[in-house]
Image: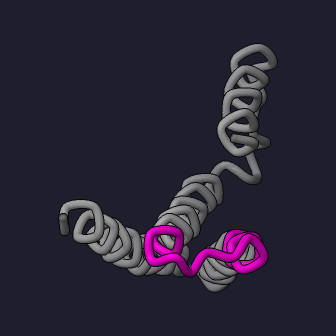
């Protein structure tokens, strides 16, 4: 219940205040979002498997986002930013689809 309430409050605050992302951080925002979705799908899978831990979720969420951003930052510094960005998106995308597939199997298993 608290998560749903927090989501609703967050959406309302975003609509009312219309926050902007600084230009320097804009290349990293899509990576942050995909990393966050990966952590959310992983936690949903753990929930369905009756293996969910809020501490593991928070650590996974933060470490996914920080690691993905650091990889993209490192790629930008080395001049291969688009390649590392693509690699991060592909890896996280595979993990997301794997988790969604496991959730789907659990739900439609009967």
Q: Is residue 75 visible?
A: yes
Residue shown at 63% from the left, 60% from the top? 32
Compared with 75, 107 (above or below) is above
**Image quadrant assignment for residue 9:** top right
Residue shown at 63% from the left, 85% from the top? 78
Please state, as top left, top right, bottom left or bottom right, where the N terminus lies in the image: top right
Name the chief secondary structure element in magenta: helix
Residue shown at 77% from the left, 14% from the top? 16
Residue shown at 32% from the left, 76% from the top? 98
Magenta segment boundaries in residue numbering = 45-61
Choose between 110 and 28: the one closer to the eye.
110
Compared with 24, 107 (above or below) is below
Which colour assignment does the render follow? one colour
Q: What is the x, y in percent for residue 55?
A: 78, 76
Choose between 24 and 61: the one closer to the eye.
61
Residue 92 placement, left or right of 54: left
Please state, as top left, top right, bottom left or bottom right, where the C terminus lies in the image: bottom left
**Image quadrant assignment for residue 95:** bottom left
Q: Can residue 73 be seen in this view?
A: no
Compared with 20, 79 (above or below) is below
Q: What is the x, y in percent for residue 48?
A: 44, 69
Residue 51 placement, left or right of 26: left
Q: What is the x, y in percent for residue 93?
A: 37, 70
Is residue 57 one of those drawn in magenta? yes
Q: How many labels does the image show?
A: 0
Is residue 49 one of those drawn in magenta? yes
Choose between 78 and 49: the one closer to the eye.
49
Seen as rendered, the residue at the extreme top is 16
Choose between 33 and 45: the one closer to the eye.
45
């Amino acid at each position: 219940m608290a998560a749903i309430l927090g989501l609703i409050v967050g959406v309302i605050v975003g609509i009312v205040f219309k926050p902007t992302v600084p230009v320097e951080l804009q290349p990293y925002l899509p990576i942050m979002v995909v990393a966050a979705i990966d952590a959310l799908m992983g936690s949903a899978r753990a929930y369905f498997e009756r293996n969910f831990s809020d501490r593991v979720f928070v650590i996974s969420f933060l470490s996914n986002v920080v690691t993905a951003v650091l990889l993209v930052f490192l790629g930008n510094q080395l001049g291969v930013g688009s390649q590392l960005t693509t690699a991060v998106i592909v890896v996280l995308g595979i993990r997301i689809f794997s988790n969604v597939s496991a959730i789907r199997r659990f739900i439609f298993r009967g």
